[in-house]
């Protein structure tokens, strides 16, 4: 009697009507869908790339990052974290079905630069930041590091609720048996990468996510990435390069970090690289400083002073500078950031709807109707072989039990 | 949630009462009555011993961390509450559970390594085609509803060792008791902290002078006495038990237990389960188990 293969009990096409294609990434593609057979609502279905052996799609083992994302999303439940509806494993593919969010921060920022530049309303920024930190506090108090916060990964529903999405790089950091190494090849989009990671730190702490929040805050204010460095690519030997240009961009605004402000600096593996940055005493006097940067932006945004509670002002600068703090041990935690006076100015509550009082309406997410065949399996650039995403170097193999 | 047991999928979906677990398994067997009758298998506890032994063998070849082995054991136990064992190739299920557990516990192993190591010890039951294991992974994840984060008692043990002023040898003994509890249904019945407290209690009361708890038959007897003694006592009465032992540490443990919110009844229950585990240890039913599994796997072509 032949052994029957795995057949999913649930079929994507029985439950959802695929409306069209939203976006693609290294992981696979995202589609917009509506429910069918009595299921109502809109959904975003993330389809992981299947692996191919030649032309035939084969089971080659699920990547570690997909496993993490599936597992973490199944546990997480918070109003500021994207809601997982279900996971369907069908036809050698993984489909993660999420609630649909109409917007994301990248798209919102983009809307404010096209065709002409006009600032995001101050109360909107405040609400977005508050909700983002609230979601992050939930992740961190559950020992989850996001590790890839950036505008494109932060969703906003049509009701103005912020949802942190894409936990593809997230992982747990409590495991006391095991140190967190930067074994993963790609971690955090370079513009949002914390200085300790740029300087080769092997320890991830929640502070890396708070740096990214600082960068996002700055970007919401200025509508441009604050530290827009050029990524140094990995060489043929696959050694991780020092991100010189990215570090340079940070130093240009914040100034060169010193031992006094960051005692751990000298212990960073790439400390010597930092000293070799093209940075002279003359440059030092040219460093604009975050404060100058901030007030210049605020001035050009021409924010109305009414209502006074929303105007970012001095408190906004203080919060930003504490998020973009070089020393990760001094950087604000999510909890501390939420208690910052920026959010409690004049005793007013931050709205849970970031679109509260807004006149402008953001356009809907672009959905390409040309591609609504979620079953198409011939995707370009699918990886071959069954290597897990994470490199296997540097992990401890010490055994804790003999047999 | 991920680090919070109380909000976790483990508590919400994978913790059962004994009766509920019995029911679930009965239903599974009832759905496959003919199959179950055609291919008899030994007692579930004997099966557990056999699987544990086999899994450890595979883990040893790849120097897998204990925590990943523990997660694999929980995966296997969860999986078999959803799928009748006679519909599966247990060797493939074990290899798959270990492969998946290694990813979840941040010590990933390449699928080819897992398949080739599994083949070297279970050559009759594992084919070289890695897609079989990949397919089984889909099956397992699907049956477990992608709920792959497992909370283990090790964490509570680590957290409690200084609070309870445990000596290193006591910690090691408690650690191995925790290792052993994966051979029972306890991971499906009690929260991890209850198991940890049970292991600590047994380890401290026992004075871990005997090497290898399960090897010493008198250990089980001692455990029985302890559990007899604490059976049915009110937390306040536990003080008396502590007082009868010379160790001040045990006394303070008992006091701590009494003051904590921990379900004493559950701890007693857990202790008994562990004791009965040691009772049936090494009964040598391994050969029968191996043959009975081989019989249905071969007959049904589950090894192909």
Image (cartoon, coloured by chain):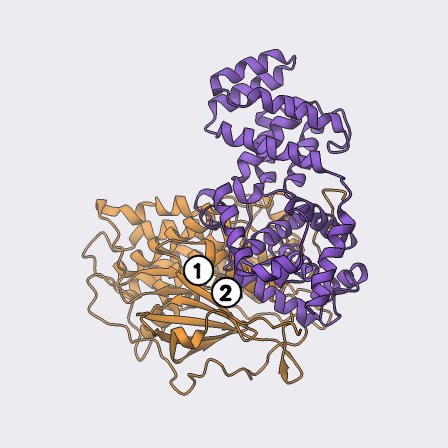
Chain colours: A orange, B purple
Which secondary structure, mark 2? helix
Q: Quadrant of residue A187?
A: bottom right
Which secondary structure, mark 1? helix
The x, y position of residue B127, in whole percent, is 74, 69
Say which chain tag 2 marks: A
Name the one closer to the observer, A56 or A306.
Answer: A56
Disc 2 + disc 1, Cβ < 8 Å: yes
Quick one: quadrant of the C terminus of chain A? top right
The x, y position of residue B14, in whole percent, is 50, 49
- The answer to whether residue A76 is left or right of residue A379 is left
The x, y position of residue B18, in whole percent, is 51, 41
Bin the neighbour count of mark 1 within 10 Å (Cα to Cα): few under 14, some 14-19, many 20 and up: many
* Residue A362, disc: none
The x, y position of residue B265, in whole percent, is 50, 29
Say which chain tag 1 marks: A
Q: Earlier in the sequence, mark 2 or mark 1?
A: 2
Residue lying at 37% horizontally and 58% vertically, measured from the top left? A294
Total tally of numbered discs in the picture:
2
In the figure, A297 relative to A340: above or below? Answer: below
Residue occupied by mark 2: A191
């Amino acid at each position: 009697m032949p052994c029957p293969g795995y057949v999913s009990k649930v079929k994507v096409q029985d439950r959802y009507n695929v409306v069209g294609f939203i976006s693609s990434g290294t992981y696979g593609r995202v589609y917009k869908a509506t429910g069918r057979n009595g299921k109502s609502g809109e959904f975003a279905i993330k389809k992981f790339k299947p692996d191919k052996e030649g032309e035939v799609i084969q089971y080659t083992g699920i990547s570690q990052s997909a496993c993490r994302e599936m597992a973490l999303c199944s546990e997480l439940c918070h109003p500021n974290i994207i809601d997982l509806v279900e996971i369907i494993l069908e036809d050698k593919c993984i489909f993660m079905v999420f609630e649909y969010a109409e917007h994301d921060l990248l798209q919102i920022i983009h809307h404010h630069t096209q065709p002409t530049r006009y600032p995001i309303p101050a109360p909107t920024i405040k609400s977005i930041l508050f909700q983002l930190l609230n979601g992050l506090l939930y992740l961190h108090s559950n020992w989850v590091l996001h590790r890839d916060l950036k505008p494109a990964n932060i969703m906003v529903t049509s009701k103005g609720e912020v949802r942190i999405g894409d936990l593809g790089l997230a992982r747990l950091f409590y495991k006391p048996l095991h140190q967190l190494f930067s074994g993963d090849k790609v971690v955090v989009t370079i513009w949002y990468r914390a200085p300790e990671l740029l300087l080769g730190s092997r320890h991830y702490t929640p502070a890396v996510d708070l740096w990214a929040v600082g960068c996002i805050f700055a970007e919401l204010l200025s509508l441009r990435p604050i530290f827009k460095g050029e990524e140094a690519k990995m060489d043929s030997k696959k050694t991780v390069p020092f991100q010189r240009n990215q570090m340079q961009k940070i130093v240009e605004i914040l100034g060169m970090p010193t031992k006094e402000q960051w005692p751990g600096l000298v212990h960073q593996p790439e400390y010597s690289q930092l000293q070799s940055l093209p940075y002279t005493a003359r440059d030092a006097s040219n460093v604009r400083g975050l404060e100058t940067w901030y007030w210049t932006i605020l001035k050009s945004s021409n924010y109305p002073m009414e209502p006074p509670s929303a105007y970012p002002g001095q408190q906004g600068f203080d919060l930003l500078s504490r998020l973009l703090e070089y020393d990760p041990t001094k950087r604000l935690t999510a909890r501390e950031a939420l208690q910052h006076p920026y959010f409690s100015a004049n005793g007013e509550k931050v709205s849970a709807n970031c679109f509260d009082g807004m006149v402008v309406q953001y356009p809907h997410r672009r959905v390409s109707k040309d591609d609504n065949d979620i079953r198409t399996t011939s995707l370009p650039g699918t990886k071959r072989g069954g290597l897990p995403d994470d490199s296997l170097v540097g992990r401890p193999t010490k055994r804790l039990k003999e047999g | 949630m991920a680090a919070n047991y109380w909000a976790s999928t483990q508590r919400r979906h994978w913790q059962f009462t004994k009766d509920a677990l019995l029911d679930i398994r009965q239903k599974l067997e009832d759905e496959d009555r003919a199959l179950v009758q055609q291919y008899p298998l030994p007692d579930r506890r004997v099966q557990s011993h056999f699987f544990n032994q086999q899994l450890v063998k595979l883990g040893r070849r790849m120097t897998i961390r204990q925590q990943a082995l523990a997660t694999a054991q929980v995966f296997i136990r969860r999986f078999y509450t959803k799928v009748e064992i006679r519909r599966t190739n247990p060797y493939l299920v074990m290899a798959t559970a270990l492969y998946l557990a290694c990813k979840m516990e941040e010590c990933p192993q390449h699928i080819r390594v897992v398949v080739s190591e599994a083949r070297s010890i279970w050559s009759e039951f594992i084919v070289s085609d890695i897609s079989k294991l990949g397919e089984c992974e889909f099956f397992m994840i699907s049956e477990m509803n992608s709920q792959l984060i497992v909370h283990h008692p090790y964490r509570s043990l680590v957290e409690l060792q200084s609070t309870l002023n445990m000596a290193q040898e006591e910690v090691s003994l408690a650690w191995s008791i925790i290792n052993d509890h994966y051979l029972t249904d306890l991971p499906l019945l009690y929260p991890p902290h209850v198991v940890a407290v049970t292991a600590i209690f047994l380890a401290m009361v026992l004075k871990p002078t005997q090497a290898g708890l399960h090897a010493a038959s008198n250990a089980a007897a001692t455990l029985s006495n302890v559990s007899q003694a604490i059976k049915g006592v009110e937390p306040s009465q536990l003080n008396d038990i502590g007082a009868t032992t010379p160790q001040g540490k045990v006394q303070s443990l008992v006091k701590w237990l009494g003051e904590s919110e921990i379900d004493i009844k559950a701890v007693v229950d857990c202790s008994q389960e562990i004791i009965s585990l040691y009772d049936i240890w090494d009964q040598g039913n391994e050969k029968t188990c191996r043959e009975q599994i081989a019989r249905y796997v071969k007959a049904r072509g589950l090894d192909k």
